[in-house]
Amino acid sequence: MNKQTGIKDLLGIAARFIVGGAFIYAGWLKAVAPAEEFAYAIETYKAVPASLTIFIALVVPWLEIYLGLFLITGVFTAYSALCLGATLLGFEGLLLQAIIRKLPVTSCGCFGASKGNSLSHEFIQNLVLLAFTALAWKYGRKLSIDSLVESYDQSESPG
Amino acid sequence: MPAKKTARKILISIMLAFAATLLTLLCRQFSIGPARPSPAWRTFGPQTAKIQIYEYTDFACPACRAAEGDMKNVIKLYQDSVRVNFKHYPLSTIHPWSFHAAAYADCAGKQGKFIEYAALLFENQEKWARTKDKPKEFSEFAKKLKLDVPALEACTEEQDTIRQVQLDVAEGDLRGVNATPTFIINGKRAVGGTQFLEQVKNFDNLLKK
């Protein structure tokens, strides 16, 4: 393994932990709080029918936890990174339309009901996370369950 | 062979998801996680206080009225060591006006008179709690406290005010509150005035730690 590959692998692992950790934390904060809290935050974006917000608020936190965990542990790493990337793009879309429409969103709902940062701050933060997600997708296979399963299967195969 | 690999990974994913679900649900069960602070007008005591109390109350409940005096004494006695987060938990099925009372108290709080308005609600509980029509006392108390009554009335209809009370109820449900008053003192539950006072007896020990 040359030096450059080593750095790329390290970056990939770090990216997995950063993105996965952020998603687990964000999901956990919302999952241990009443779903209504997050539902109200979603409502303020005025992008989905009010009747759907509670359903979304019930589902999204668990999705964040599971995908974050899959990325950190490196199971289906590429797919997990892709799904998280798509989720982040969805969040970016929501934030952008709220910024353009100048909606009075007091809590972005990103990390539970805490006041949080401004929408533009969250938008930039998500861009950074998107960049890390790309790194995790491209270089995140080292020290992962994926690689562990591969090497286990190779050692098991005859010859 | 690839199918075998995928099956292994799926099995690991399911195990991970199961563990994460179990852990998160346990956190919910034991109320581990950041508590939502009450608005400033119904939070009393320093933020860094060693004893953190969350009090779930219904203005139409007689036991809450009885516990109100004890709570006032505790705040007076342990003013620098106790922080009280007052939470609404109107039992609307048995007290038809308690949700409205909570909204009125919050709107009075926005005008700086939460404690005074809450005291009037408790003192006159028997007059308004079981009336058929909307109690006139709600505006009378506001006039008595020299509040801006039209602004107060408008505030009680606002979505934000209603949500604030609804969120308190949802949070109470999540924390397993089903009777009032319920106190959560440094994570420990007390239901009713007697259990509350039992825990208060331990405050000096808690403060020594």
Image (cartoon, rainbow, N blue to C red):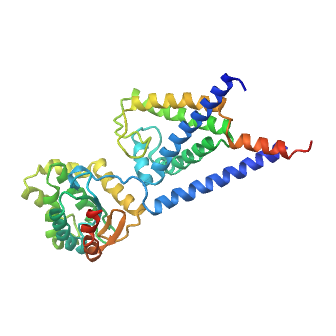
| Viewer-proximal residue among B173 and A127 | A127
**Which residue shows up at 17% across the image and 56% down it?**
B114
Task: Quadrant for the C terminus of chain A, please.
Answer: top right
Kindly identify the residue that appears in the image at 54 percent across and 57 percent down: B23
Q: Is residue B203 depicted above or below B157 in this figure?
A: below
Residue B15 screen position, x and y as percent = 66, 55
Task: For residue A98, say whether it is visible.
Answer: no
Quarter-wise, where is residue B119 in the image?
bottom left
Q: How many marks?
A: 0
**The one of A76 and A36 positioned closer to us in this rendering:** A76
Quarter of the image with the N terminus of chain A is top right
Say above or below: B187 vs B10. Answer: below
| Image coords of residue A124 (percent x, y) | 45, 27
Q: x%, y% of residue A115?
A: 35, 41
Q: Dividing the picture into quarters, in which one does residue B169 lie? A: bottom left
Q: Outermost residue, right direction?
A: A159
Q: Is residue B184 visible?
A: yes
Q: Is residue A111 above or below residue B97?
A: above
Q: Name the residue nearer the viewer: A31 or A35.
A: A31
Report x, y in % for residue A21. 53, 42
Q: In the displayed structure, would residue A91 be above or below residue B31?
A: above
Q: Between residues B94 and A124, which one lies in front from this camera angle?
A: A124
